[in-house]
Amino acid sequence: MTPAPWNERLRDRIPTSLREEIDTFETQMEMRKVGKVDEKVFAETRLRRGVYGQRYDNGQRHDGVRPRTLAYPRGDLKKGPDTVWDAPGMTRIKIPMGRLTNEQLDVIAELAEEYSDGILHVTTRQDVQLHFVHIEDTPDMMRRLGAVGITTREACGNVVRNVTACPYAGVCNTQSFDVTPYAHALTYFLLGHKDSQDFGRKLKIAFSGCRSEACGLANIHDIGALAIVREDNGEKVHGFELYVGGGLGSVPHQAKLLGFVPAEELLPTAQAICRVFARLGEKKNRARARLKFVVARLGIDEFRQVVAAERAILPEDDRWTSYLGDLGVTEETPAYPAAPLPEGIFKKGFADWRRTNVRPQAQVGYAIATVRLPLGDLTSRQARGLSEVARRFAGDTIRLTVEQNIVVRWVPEARLPELYAALAEHDLHGPGAGTVADITSCPGTDTCKLGISASRGLSAALEQHLAGAELDDDVRGLRIKTSGCFNSCGQHHIADIGFLGVSRNVKGRRVAHFQLVVGGKWADNGGAYGLAIGAFPAKRIPKVVDELTAYYTGEREEGESFHRFIERVGKGAVRKRLEHLKQVPDYDVDPSFYTDWGDAREYTIGDMGAGECAGEVVSLTEFGLADSERALYEAQSELDAGHAHQAGSLAYRAMLEAAKALVKLENIDVIDEPDQIVGEFTSRFHDTGRFHDRYAGAKFAHYLLAAHASPPNGEALDEMRQKIEEAQLFIEAAHACYDRMQGAGL
C-alpha cells in the first residue's frame, strides 16, 4: 500500500511553533544524511521527537497472536540495520493524561495503516506506539498529528516524558478532585521548557486523584502528585502531596514525600525540581542518572531544602497561576442523557463483560466501560470502529489506561447492552478487564533491543491459559505483569505476580527464563515493590502461576490479600514450594524448552543491541552547536536559491546560536536576545582569550562581533557568501573551544 499524500489543507490547523519544529527536524534529517550532524546529537534529537530505532530479527511479532506485516515494506528486515535509515523503527505518540478525541484516534489509525503495520500499541504510560515506521515518513506523520492537536515532541529522550493521570479523573467515586486540568497545565508548561532540557535521563510525572487506588501510580514516578483537599482557616484548599524520587528499573526506589503544595505552587515547584535534577543529576553514568539517585544521595530532608531554595530564586512566571482561572479547559460534558439500566434478559456474554469491564461513574446514571486490549494492541480497523462506537454512545470521552486498555466514559447505563453489541462487531467486547488474565507486558524481544525473553509471547500464553480456567474470586483479582528484561517497563515490581526475562545456559545451550517477582502491591498507587525469588524456564511459567495461586488459595487466612499472604509465609517458603519447576529437560528429551514463547526458532540472545530508552547524554552546548550548524545549512540553501538577504541573516543567526551554546556551558541562563548573547560571549570567552587558539587568534571571534555591530543586510550574493564562510569558521572555532574545555574537565 502506498501512503496517502499529506493533505496540505490541514497545514493551517498546525500551530505555527509546531510546524516550525517539524520543519526543523526535517532539515536535521537531511543534514544527518549528508554527514553534517553528529550521529550522537541526531540520535537524541530524533528521540526527543519520538523516533526510536527498534530490534530486528525477522520483522514479525512473536506473541503467537497475530503477525505484524508491514503495509509497504522497504528493504530486508531480516538483516540487522546499521543505522535508523536502513530499516523502519518505532514512533511514540504522546497522549497526555491518556485523553484522546475520536478524531485523533481516527488519524492515528490512518497513520498505522499507511506508515506502519496497521497496529496501534497502547503503552503503560498512556502513549500510543507505531512500529515499523520509516524515519523518512516521520515528518509527514508529525504534521498530520499536529493538525489534530498531537505532538510527539519529548515522547522519548532525556526530558520530561508524557504526563500520565488516572483515566477515571473527573468521574471517579473516590477522587478528592479532578486532577485533569492540573496535569494538563503542567504538561504544556514543561513541554519544551528551558529548565527541562538538560537532564542526564528522563523524568516521569503522574497524577492521582486518590490515595488507595492504583490508577495513577504516583509512588513509582520521579514526581507523583496526589490530590488532597485541606482545611485552612475554614477554607478548602486544593493541592497535592508531591512524591519524588520514585522509579522502577533494575533497582526500584519508592517515592518520598516532598510535602504538600497548594495548586498555585504546583507548576513552580515542579520547575524547581527540574532545575535541581538538571544541576545535580548524574550526566556520565547513565545507570545512576535518574532523579531517584539524587533523592537517595541527598536524603529527602536535604532534597526538600534544595528544592525550596531553588523555588525561592525562580523568576516569576504568569503561567504558574493563570491556568487556575480556566480549570474548565479539560471539562467533559455528556453527549447523551443519563438513564438507569432496566431489568431484562441481555445478550449472551453481556453479564460477564459488565461484571469486569463496567464501573459506575460518580455521576448517577452514567458508567465507564473498559475496552480490554490483549497485549495493548488494536488494529487500525478496530481503532476506527471504536471511534465510531464512542461517538454513538458517549461522545468524545476516550482515555488510555496504564494497564494498556481504553476506557469510554459517560455511557448512559441504559445503553450498555447496545454498546456491548457494537463493540462485539469490532471484536472489542472481551471481558476480564482488570483481572488476572488482563496482563500488562512490555514489547520484550519483539521490538526492543534490550529484550532478553519474549514477554509478549509469555503474556499471550498466560492470557490464553487463564481465560478459560476455573479461578477463585481472589485469584481472579490478581495482577500479573511481565517485562522482557530487568528494566521493569512491564511494571513487574508492583504486580502481585511479576516476571522479568533472563537467560540461562543449560549444557551449552541458551534457554529463555523468567525471574518470578512476588510481594508487589498494585493498590495504594503502587504501594510496595516485590522481589525476584528465582528464575524458571519460560515454558514452565504457566505451571508456576498455577502452583503459586493454588498455594495461596490453600494456605491463606480469612480475608487475606495475596500481598499479605506473601508477607506472612515469606518468600523463602514460596521459593521452596516452586523449586521443582526450575528443572530444564535435556534438549533431546524436550527441545521446546529451547525456544521462546511464540517463536519456533532456537532461542538466542545474539540479536540484542543497545537500548534507546533515553539515548546518550547530550549537553545543551552540543544541541546549541547542532542548531548553529542547522542555521548555517539553511543559510547555504538560501544562498543557492539566490536569496542573499535571508542567507546573510541566517549566517548571523548561526554564529549567535554557537556563541549562546558556549555561554550555556557556564550555566548562564541566556535569553534569546542578541545583545545579551554577544555580551556574555565577549566577557567570558573573547576578553578572557578562552575562545582563541594558536591558529585563529581573535580573528574568528571578531566575525561575530562585526556581524552583531552591523547585521548582514545586503543583496550581494558574493558578500553574503563571505558571511557564510565567516560563520562556518566561527562555528568550527566554537566546536574547538568546546572540545578544549571538555578535555580540561570544564
Image (tube, rainbow, N blue to C red):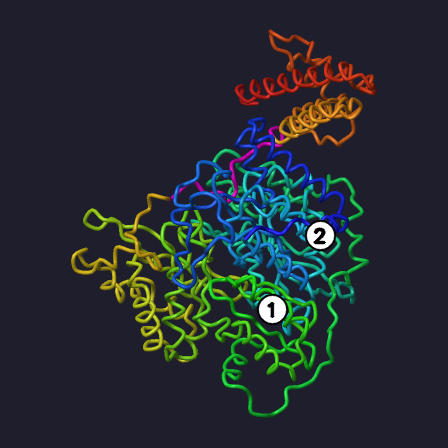
Pinpoint residue 140: horizontal percent, then vertical percent: 64, 46
C-alpha distance separating marks 1 and 2? 21 Å
Q: Are marks 1 and 2 in contact (CB under 8 Å)?
A: no
Q: Callout 1 environment at 10 Å: few (<14), some (14 to 19), or many (20+)?
A: many
Tell me where residue 105 appears, x and y as whole percent: 63, 61
Mark number displayed over residue 183: none
**Picture quadrant of residue 241:** bottom right
Q: Main secondary structure of the magenta part?
A: loop
Residue 386, numbered label: 1
Q: Residue at x 74, y 80 (%)?
A: 337
Q: Residue at x 78, y 67 (%)?
A: 234
Q: Is residue 614 magenta?
A: yes
Q: Residues within 10 Å of mark 2 (few under 14, many from 20)?
A: many
Q: Which mark is residue 147?
A: 2
Q: Amino acid at mark 1?
A: Leu
What range is drawn magenta here?
Answer: 608-622
Q: Is residue 276 magenta?
A: no
Of residues 375 and 688, which is closer to you in this image? 375
- Say which quadrant the C terminus sits in: top right
Q: Nearer the viewer, residue 242 or 462?
A: 462
Three-letter residue code for mark 2: Ala
Q: Residue at x 71, y 44 (%)?
A: 18
